[in-house]
Image: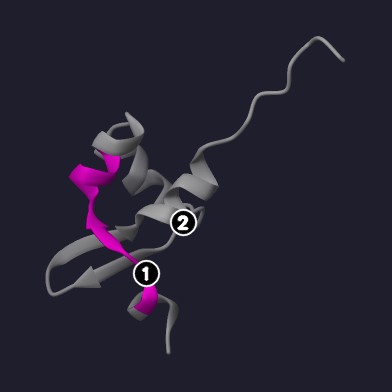
């Protein structure tokens, strides 16, 4: 079974809204290979989980405990 078949694919607009980024940002990340885009007919979809893993990055704290 391919990754695309098991992924929860969503439209670019919904993905952008969920992560509070622009659709243009998501398109750039697909173009540079950071995330995978999937064409369904003429529409482009992304895996929301993959997008979250690749774009959401923790910022380390300046304080050490």
At label 1, counting other C-alpha atoms closer than 10 Å, the crowd grade (few under 14, some 14-19, many 20 or more) is: few
Q: Is residue 60 magenta?
A: no
The secondary structure type at the circle numbered 2 is: helix
Q: Name the residue under label 1.
A: 7
Residue 59 lies, in percent from the top left, at 65, 24
Residue beneath the point at 53% across and 48% down: 54
Q: Which mark is residue 47?
A: none
User: Is residue 62 rendered to the left or right of residue 20?
Assistant: right
The reply to whether the magenta stretch includes residue 13 is: yes
For residue 13, which quarter of the picture?
top left
Determine the residue positioned at 73% across, 23% down. Answer: 60
Outermost residue, right direction?
65
Which residue of the protein is positioned furthest toward the bottom in this rendering? 1
Point out the residue furthest to the left here: 42
Seen at 63% across and 30% down, the residue is 58
With respect to residue 52, does 36 lie above or below? below
Residue at image x 43%, y 90%?
A: 1
Asked if the residue at tag 2 contacts the one at tag 1, i.e. Cβ–Cβ closer than 8 Å, the answer is yes
The 10 Å Cα crowd at callout 2, few under 14, some 14 to 19, many 20 or more, is some
Q: Mark 2 points at which residue?
A: 50
- Would residue 29 appear left or right of 20 to someone viewing this image? right
Which stretch appears magenta?
Answer: 6-16
Q: Position of residue 64 (x, y in %)?
A: 86, 14
**57 versus 29 height, above or below:** above
In the rendered image, the quadrant that contains the C terminus is top right
Q: Is residue 30 left or right of residue 58?
A: left
Give the SS element for disc 1: loop
Mark-to-mark CA distance, 1 and 2 = 9 Å
Q: Count the numbered circles shown.
A: 2
């Amino acid at each position: 079974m391919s990754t695309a078949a098991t992924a929860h694919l969503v439209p670019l607009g919904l993905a952008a809204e969920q992560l509070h980024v622009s659709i243009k940002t998501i398109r750039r990340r697909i173009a540079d290979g950071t995330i995978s885009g999937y064409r369904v007919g003429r529409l482009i979809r992304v895996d929301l989980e993959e997008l979250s893993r690749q774009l959401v990055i923790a910022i380390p704290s300046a304080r050490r405990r």
